[in-house]
Amino acid sequence: MTSTNLSRSICILGLGLIGGSLMRDLAAQGVHVYGYNRSASGSRAATDDGFDASDDLTATLRRAEQDKAIIVLATPMPAIPGLLDAIIEFAPSCGITDVVSVKAAVYELIRERGLEDRYVGSHPMAGTAESGWNASRQGLFTRAAWVITYDHAADASDEWIALWTDVAHMILGVGADAIPARIGRHDAAVARVSHLVHIFAEALAIVGDNGGALAQSLAAGSFRDSTRVAGTQPSLVRAMCETNAEAVVLALDEALDLLHDARDSLAKPLPDITTLAETGYAARVRFEARHGARGESVSPVKISSRPLLRLNPGAPGWVRQLEQAETLGGRIDIF
Amino acid sequence: MTSTNLSRSICILGLGLIGGSLMRDLAAQGVHVYGYNRSASGSRAATDDGFDASDDLTATLRRAEQDKAIIVLATPMPAIPGLLDAIIEFAPSCGITDVVSVKAAVYELIRERGLEDRYVGSHPMAGTAESGWNASRQGLFTRAAWVITYDHAADASDEWIALWTDVAHMILGVGADAIPARIGRHDAAVARVSHLVHIFAEALAIVGDNGGALAQSLAAGSFRDSTRVAGTQPSLVRAMCETNAEAVVLALDEALDLLHDARDSLAKPLPDITTLAETGYAARVRFEARHGARGESVSPVKISSRPLLRLNPGAPGWVRQLEQAETLGGRIDIF
């Protein structure tokens, strides 16, 4: 599957790590892709690298409207409302997707504006603590999980199904695994495996720092790896966790229960954290088994270990297939 | 500084990841080194790789006594009392060091047996989630922090000072940074930057696993890195945390305060985790600045970023110099 199945141009708003990497991959696949970046320095960096970028939002959206392009919102959450309003004004018939790491908060903005039938949510699980165009690179999404939402599928128009299909083609075209998930399921899952990781990393970094020069000098690889994402810009961490607060609180409460149990066990005359150590070990072993072939393979060809479901968008039963893929954490292909 | 300054043979009890890597490095430096491993398969693996290893503890200790070797205890904590008793019986005049990740619990065993003047504690901050001889490798300790304790220095005999000097030479000989720290300071520091990291990793792995197949499928690099040490054998995690329980509880309480504050902020109508995100980011930036040249340098020659103090063991004021290095998290060299 290559992005040659994509039937439309792509217009990316926000050329940072994710938007920039998407632009590089799509261009490499021969897709007609252009974009906008608020800072002139960012759009100039993209232009200097040979890409089609502008810092004029209105002109970029007018061009997208003329092309019937799909617009990809690739900015942090706080910029989304303003961009949606500009799209309504200057690109009133374009399909829209986004790559924001929370989906309910974005969908609320979509619903407020009555844009449900023009919108398909998405979220690539890729990134580093770096940001900006200069951190972007081709191949960032290879075998990464890239969620595509489908809450609107049951009530969808043919136009929406065509948009959904093109967003799926875009995801597959950059080598990612397209994983269908409804908004609520997505937000609950990323609260556990991403947002909570950020909160833990911040806390660990602070407790380590409080230990002063000796503790910092003794910190080795495990501390470095566990605090890596504390190096993410605070505004990005806030945007993720605060806009997904409800799901993050549920995950955090689960974690706090485990940590309090461990604390109480350690404070006893005969400390014993067998349960935590054995349950955590078993959980990590399952994670490794599931991710087996991915990421850490020595082979240059990364093979996905996720189950694959082939589906025909809009055909009878396709929503049930999507739900099945969601339950398995499976990836889809389009036929 | 090379290990050619080491004036004695080294006898390593326990040829796992740490003991095995130490044996490889010392042998490469031309040091007379041999060892014992409880399991015959482990000692055979070492022998097959061309090293001098045995599964006969009594014979190995008798040989150490004859050589006046320094004995390195390189087993997990639970095996230490039995080994000390065997040393008292079969190697009654050898100097002793250890590489256990907690120091107060080991020193209690030393004091119970009146071995203070024959013992210098140590702890290399190196390792992986792997274990056993087959995980050992040459160069594991290059530029790693390796703590050397000195609580006994004020009351020390000339023999103890000579032993301390040789343990320092051994550490420097394998390319590690020798960092003096008293037992209490060491245990408090590693509770923050190592043991707490393990407890957090276990909790994260469990909360992620509870999210089922979808959450596991969406878990990316940050989850993988943050849960890596949950792949450590539960018995090793228990040995570390349970024997350093008092210091771990203090570090954990600090972390729990931060997490509860974050939880409360996220549960408000207008969630706001600015303080956590900004303090954590600043802490991580300081960590990176301190560790600058270490570990992630592209240069094959790793340069230490730790301050260096040169000292002459036993000379007037040397204990004050050790305290100064401890406060800075600095490394020492011997002249």
Image: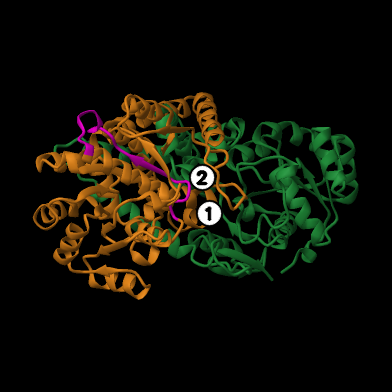
Chain colours: A green, B orange
Q: Tag 1, which secondary structure?
A: helix
Q: Chain of mark 2?
A: A
Residue labelled with disc 2: A194
* Mark 1 surroundings within 10 Å by alpha-carbon count, few (fewer than 14), some (14 through 19), many (20 or more): many
Specify whether B100 is left or right of B327.
Answer: left
Q: Is residue B145 magenta?
A: yes
Residue labelled with disc 1: B218
Q: Residue at coordinates 56% horizontally, 51% vertically from top-left? A: A182
What span is colored magenta in the figure? B140-158
How many numbered marks are there?
2
Specify whether A109 is left or right of A262.
Answer: right
Q: Quadrant of residue B282?
A: top right
Q: Position of residue B254 (x, y in %)?
A: 35, 28
Of residue A208 and residue B187, the one placed in the foreground of this image is: B187
At label 1, the amino acid type is Leu
**Numbered tag placed on residue A134 in the rendering:** none
